[in-house]
Image (spheres, rainbow, N blue to C red):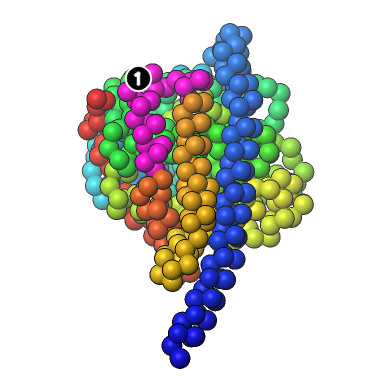
Amino acid sequence: MMLPLYASATSVVHTMIGVTDDVILVYFLVLNSFYGLLLILSIPELWGHWHLSDDEHLRHVLGSEALPPLTILVPAYNEQATIVESTLSFLTLQYPRHEVVLVNDGSPDDTMNTLVREYDLYQVPPAVMISVPSKPVRAYYRSRRFSKLFVIDKENGGKADSLNAAMNAARYPYVLAVDADTLIEPDALLRLARPFLLGKSVAAVGGTIRVANNCRIEYGRVVEAGVDTRWLPGIQTVEYLRAFLFGRLGWNRLGGNMIISGAFGMFRRDHVLAIGGYRTATVGEDMDLVVRLRRYLRERGLKDEIPFIPDPVAWTEVPTSHKVLGRQRERWHRGLIEILWANRDLMFNPRYGSMGMLAYPFFFFGEMLAPVVELTGYIMLVLGLAFGVIDLQFAWLFLLVAIMYGSLLSFWAIILEELSFRRYPSLKDLMWMSIFAIAESFGYRQMTVWFRLQAFWKFFRKEHSWGTMTREGFAARKPG
């Protein structure tokens, strides 16, 4: 009696596995083919930007007063390890006219005291027009050392709330939102402002983020790039390279880029104020702002563009522990879920052009649901082994399409970097990046799938926490 029941159960499981296997393989084949398309589209974009950045006349104009003045917005929470170097890097950027508005978001560590001591801050009367709401401000400060530095000390309200407070104090028409642990290359603002000189209306511009771990840093500048040979930061170096060098660059050709990194993005201040500033009810405030901005522009028939520029580079410290990486990736994915759910009316909506017909469906099916589909693939493999009905063809195809194809794309990103900007001239660094491109698929990828799956649980529970992001500090890392 038991044998027929077991045979029947095995037959049902075999059928279920077969159907699910086909769906999973098609899913990853389509998804990775789209990534391949982004790679192909990024090549002419990269070539054009590379030649444009080498134009002698353009470099001359970039150094002139033709560029719009801008305000750098720096939210800071528990950043005492990096705040002196990063603030100095913002203050000494090559740009005709800019200011730095730094917001201490109620840090319980020594961030504020470090700023007061290192930059000789003195309190000034409150003379700021409140255009968007934020948590109460305790005091405003200016620096005796740098006239362009303005510091706000306020009660804790989160990153988005701090950016709103900084936006209120900004004096200039364009604002650059950065993270306090970001180190910007000296000429990055000049390069980031390039679209403003090409005769088109620009609402926002995004730049490239690279990994600062194991780079040699002097006076708030990366003077020698290096790849961290530790597993976690090393793999993230390749991951960031792939995401920015062809992932976001390819979207320029498709016209639907929905993300500008919160660590390095420039916006027209009047547009941001018109949509109510940053929304504090999400942990993905950077993507949320871009989506709302694109909706605002589309609904009013404005033709302002939101391009990504590959050569303005900012450097940031990435997590070096599994715990901190897990908090970061869970929060990123939870923010993605929140934003896609809040804007679900965009799905295949022709009113919103390429964002509705292409970008939103891609981020929904290809980014948000990817960890769920991948987990299902692993479960099917385990069930197949348990019931003795494992499909070896599926196992190999799943390994090839879902996992190894990502390594191939990483190799292409490394090749594009080597052919274009060559920020990592050392052969040793190229060797380590190649090793990490392979290693990413075995352990790291599955770990981040787990982190991202946790985001669904926290989203349904309506959790809004960020978690503690501890840092080593720039001084702790030297190449070699």
Whether the magenta-drawn stretch holds residue 389 is answered as no
Q: Is residue 87 above or below residue 187?
A: below
Identified at 68% across, 56% down, the residue is: 346
Task: Note whether residue 86 is visible.
Answer: no
**Residue 228 at x, y percent in the picture:** 30, 32
Left/right placement of residue 401 relative to residue 435 reads right
Q: Is residue 430 magenta?
A: yes
Would residue 314 be visible to someone looking at this image? yes
**Residue drawn at the location 35% of the way across and 49% of the way down:** 443
| Residue located 57% across and 45% down the image | 32
Residue extending farthest bottom: 1
Residue carrying label 1: 426
> Dividing the image into 4 quarters, which one contains the C terminus?
top left
Q: Quadrant of residue 247?
A: top right
Residue type of the residue flagged with mark 1: Ser
Secondary structure of the residue carrying tag 1 is loop
Residue 236 location, quadrant: top left
Magenta segment, prevailing SS (helix, strand or loop)? helix
Give residue 453's position: percent from left, percent from top: 44, 61
Q: In the drawing, does residue 271 fall left or right of residue 455?
A: right
Q: Between residue 199 and residue 407, name the one nearer to us.
A: 407
Q: Nearer the viewer, residue 379 or 353?
A: 379
Query: What residue span does the magenta drawing correspond to?
Result: 417-440
Foreground of the two, 160 or 117: 160
Q: Tell me where residue 72 appears, x and y as whole percent.
A: 46, 33
- Position of the N terminus, as image quadrant, is bottom left
Residue 348 is situated, as x and y percent measured from the top left of the image, at 72, 55
Residue neighbourhood size for the residue with mark 1, other residues' Cα within 10 Å, grouped as few (<14), some (14–19), many (≥20): few
As drawn, 58 above or below 450: above
Question: Viewed as shown, does residue 83 lie left or right of 238?
Answer: left
